[in-house]
Image: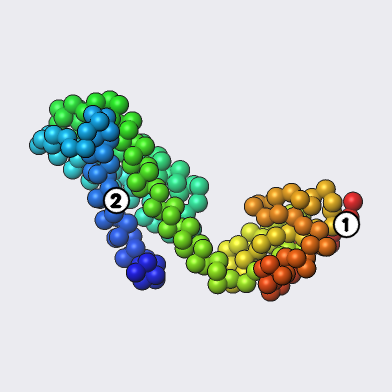
Amino acid sequence: MLQHILNAPRHIKRLITLCYDTIIIPLAIYASLALRHGEVLININEKLVLTAISTTILSLLVFIRAGLYRAVIRYMATKAFGTLAIGITISAMILATSSFITQANLPRSSIIIYWFTAFALLGAPRLLIRNIVNQLSNSSKEAVVIYGAGNQGIALMNALSNSETYLPIAFIDDNRKKQGSIIKGLKVHGQEQLATLNESHNLSLIHISEPTRPY
């Protein structure tokens, strides 16, 4: 089922995400109040319902305006999650304002709890799906190492990381000062470890980025 969703047209995936957020925002409001009062079942009145509806609609408009539904989940990075945090902050402000206008009189602490609850419920699934997609994508890629851990090697690694064919797994460099260090999440090895890497990862290619000099 997940594979069908991932292969669906982009507008369908955006619609699914929008529907999910529509459900989660009022759920996060309810959860924040339940946590605030320490009770699973809380009293729901018309004012609270009106507050939840207005907060949900306005929050979705903010999310749309912020471009959250333009971001492809598999490529979501720190910037996208930062945008989500800003959107939820505005949503919390909307909740507080709506509560004041409708006289729902939500406790102030519940607004803070709502922020953390909404961020967890909205952000965690996006992060989980992104990790699942990346794992599925990486499993079909050819493992490669990059010979040379300098600026050109890093640029090559960035280019290959966005490729649908190759997956950089390590750097090889003759500079002993670099060996053992981590660059952009990849460990730098010496030439003597190339055979071990080949056995464990079944390397397809060795990309030479630049001449290296031992120190």
Counting from the top left corner in percent of width and height, residue 93 is at 30, 33
Q: Mark 1 or mark 2, which has the lower sequence index?
A: 2
Q: How far apart are marks 1 and 2 (CA)?
A: 53 Å
What colour-coding does the image apply?
Answer: rainbow
Which of the pair 121/162 is nearer the observer? 121
Q: What residue type is labelled 2?
A: Asp
Left or right of residue 205: residue 165: left
Name which residue type carries label 1: Arg
In the rendered image, the vertical position of residue 101 relative to residue 176, given as above or below: above
x, y (%) of residue 50?
Answer: 14, 39
The quarter of the image holding the N terminus is bottom left
In-front residue for pair 190/118: 190
Residue 57 visible: yes
Q: Residue at x 18, y 43 (%)?
A: 53
Residue 15 quadrant: bottom left
Rendering coords of residue 63 (x, y %): 33, 47
Q: Is residue 167 left or right of residue 79?
A: right
Number of numbered discs present? 2
**Which residue is found at the position 42% from the left and 58% from the top?**
129
Under circle 1, the secondary element is: loop
User: Farthest residue toward the left?
Assistant: 46
Circles 1 and 2: CB atoms closer than 8 Å: no
Q: Name the residue under label 1.
A: 213
Q: Is 172 positioned to the left or the right of 34 in the image?
A: right
SS at circle 2:
helix
User: Going by the picture, which residue comes out furthest to the bottom?
Assistant: 204
As rendered, which of 40 and 47 lies closer to the eye? 40
Q: Name the residue under label 2.
A: 21
